[in-house]
Image (cartoon, rainbow, N blue to C red):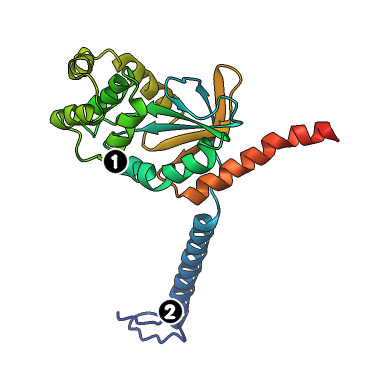
Amino acid sequence: MVLTFSMGGPSVLRAEGISTEQADAILEELKGIRKLLESQQALLERSARAPAAERVVKLAVVENYVLGSPDAPVTLVEFTDYQCPFCSRFHTHTYPQLKKDFIDAGKVRFISRDLPLGIHTQALPAARAARCAGEQGKFWDMRHVLSSNPKNLGEAELGQYAGNLGLDAEQFQACLESGKHDAAIRRDEADARSIGITGTPAFILGRSPRGDQFEGIHISGAQPYAVFVAKINKLLAGSRAPDSAKSQ
């Protein structure tokens, strides 16, 4: 039996050992399959265009490393991995403008937390290095250096960064070797995973907490500045609404 047909236009059918009715039935079935595939494709395209629903999570408040005014109405928490290239992209491309426009302006508090991924062997030592630098008042300086150099986080580089920042070398090295900050780092990891965060960078954005629980939306990945601005401004507008209502 030989059967030929065209799906895009009038069908041409040549067959041996098959009736006209059977051939027509086959063609109708093929047309039905085609319509089903086309409808599924259209559904996929609509789903891709539709904005994903925001996932709201609750996180224990940990404020070891905070930038911004304590009275800022909005808080942004970042879980970072210093060896992660996407974290570095956020830090170099998006964070500086966010800091200038929102953190330094007293509108947003920024909290740094750790999530060294198992696939990055230098991420945990780098997280230790940032915290050890913090013992000498240089956490944010070290964080900037580490985030800007995700491919250069070996032991020698960490010592060099510490020296460039003017840290006491012996104190810094002793801190690194002690592993004294590992429990706090592991707590950050556990808190992240408890709300389904397994990749970096990951952010939680919400109104600043007043108790020991922080509730906000989960933002995944190194999103562009415009994405953060839209979500922050929405929260800022909401935080002003109660005051406006009281004044009326």
Q: Are the residues flagged by discs 2 and 1 in contact, CB closer than 8 Å?
A: no
The residue located at (41%, 28%) in the rendering is 112
Q: Which residue is mark 1?
A: 148
Nearer to me, 46 or 207:
207
Residue 85: horizontal and vertical position, in percent? Answer: 29, 43
Figure label count: 2
Location of residue 125 by image quarter: top left
Q: Residue type at mark 2? A: Met
Is 147 situated above or below 192? below
**Residue sitting at the far front:** 166
Q: Which tag is nearer the camera, tag 2 or tag 1?
A: 1
* SS at badge 2: loop
Q: Residues within 10 Å of mark 1 (few under 14, many from 20)?
A: some
Residue kind at label 1, given as amino acid type = Ser
Task: Describe the element under mark 1 as helix, strand or loop.
Answer: helix
Q: How many residues crowd mark 2 within 10 Å: few (<14), some (14–19), many (20+)?
A: few
Residue highlighted by disc 2? 7
* Whether residue 245 can be seen here: yes
Residue 92 appears left or right of 210: left
Residue 140: image quadrant is: top left
* Quarter of the image with the C terminus in it: top right
Point out residue 208 in the picture as x, y percentages from the top left corner: 58, 27
- First along the sequence among labels 2 and 1: 2
Q: Position of residue 211 (x, y in %)?
A: 59, 17
Res. 106 mark: none
| Viewer-side residue, 44 vs 51 | 51
C-alpha gap between disc 2 and disc 1: 55 Å
Is any part of residue 197 visible from this angle? no
Residue at the spot 76% in from the left edge and 32% down from the top edge:
243
Q: Residue at x 55, y 51 (%)?
A: 51
Picture coordinates of residue 127, whole percent (x, y): 29, 26
